[in-house]
Amino acid sequence: MAAAVADCEVNDESNDNGNDPGAAPYGNFQNYYTFNPPENRLSLIPSTLLQEIGCSTESSETILVLDVGCNSGDLSLALYKHLQGHHSQTGELRLLGVDLDEDLILRAEQSNPFRENISFIPLDITHDLDSRTQLESYLARFGRSRFNLCACLAVTMWVHLNHGDAALLELLSRLASLSDHLLLEAQPWKCYRSAARRMRKLGRRDFDHFKTLEIRGDIAKYAKKHLERRCGMGLLRSFGRTTWGRKLLLFGKREMRQGEI
Ligand SMILES: C[S@@+](CC[C@H](N)C(=O)[O-])C[C@H]1O[C@@H](n2cnc3c(N)ncnc32)[C@H](O)[C@@H]1O
């Protein structure tokens, strides 16, 4: 019989590997990549993604990628290499990883072999003023007002549980306003239940908003609706499901949309 397959970062199975991940109330697991290695998502993302979203191979413009909730940076680095492979004849690729956990950001910086092109900064994306100031100042270094691509992978649930419905929608609106394209992996509702259960088991305080959330059920569908109706974005591609059964969706500004899938 196959071993129990983890499908949430908060499953007992996924974390029961001898390294106590701690309570990690923001999903700030210190050992995240031991139970969800970058390949689980990267294998679904075409290495030609940048070309597909219109970052022309003719152009010498720097391509800017934002990775929101980058944890210890393992996926950021792997994503950079994955995209860089097909992009080496064009303008430079720069990636900025942000996370609210300063220890994780420190680790990401320490193990970053591409310091010229990849930067990590501590940032809580739900802090409107802070994130605007810091991200705008990064963009300004390149004379730009938006990223070409923003990756927001396995972050929405933590913002939603800790800050509520309005914050989830604000997060999506913020990312849509910051970037031409959004690569989104939203955790499904069953993971919310696992996360709440786990906090209880650890004797921790419940998530502030779990019981009162009105957005529940098909979270990816809500996100898509919000991005389409309120943010001028449309679904460009669905890259299928990760090994944890989550949809990996690519959205683009409506004027850049090539067709719905
Ligand atoms: C489950 S991990 C996902 C890491 C990475 N995005 C990936 O998919 O491999 C979620 C990360 O989001 C970060 N995070 C949660 N809320 C955040 C916020 N408001 N601002 C920035 N980072 C946040 C956590 O600290 C954690 O490192």
Image: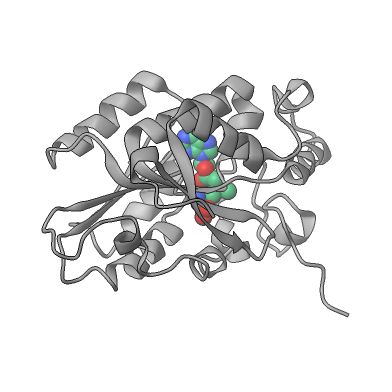
Q: Position of residue 14 (x, y in %)?
A: 72, 60
Which residue is painted at 17% across and 57% down in the image? 116
The structure residue drawn at horizontal position 71% and vertical position 57%, both measured from the top left corner, is 15
Which residue is pictured at 19% across the width and 65% down the height?
57
Q: Quadrant of residue 137?
A: top left
Report the number of numbered marks. 0
Residue 58 visible at all: yes
| Figure quadrant of residue 155 | top right
Q: Residue furthest front?
A: 259
Q: Is residue 56 left or right of residue 207?
A: left
Residue for point 34% across, 23% down: 130
Vertical placement of 130 versus 138: above or below? above
Q: Is residue 184 above or below residue 122?
A: below
Q: Residue 261: x, y in percent?
A: 54, 55
Please tell me which residue lies in front, 218 or 133: 218
Residue 235 falls left or right of residue 193? left
- Left or right: residue 68 versus residue 54 is right
Query: Foreground residue, 59 or 5?
Result: 59
Q: Is residue 178 left or right of residue 74?
A: left
Judging depth in this view, the residue of 7 and 224 nearest the camera is 224
Q: Is residue 164 something that shows in the picture?
A: no
Residue closest to the eye, 9 or 199: 9
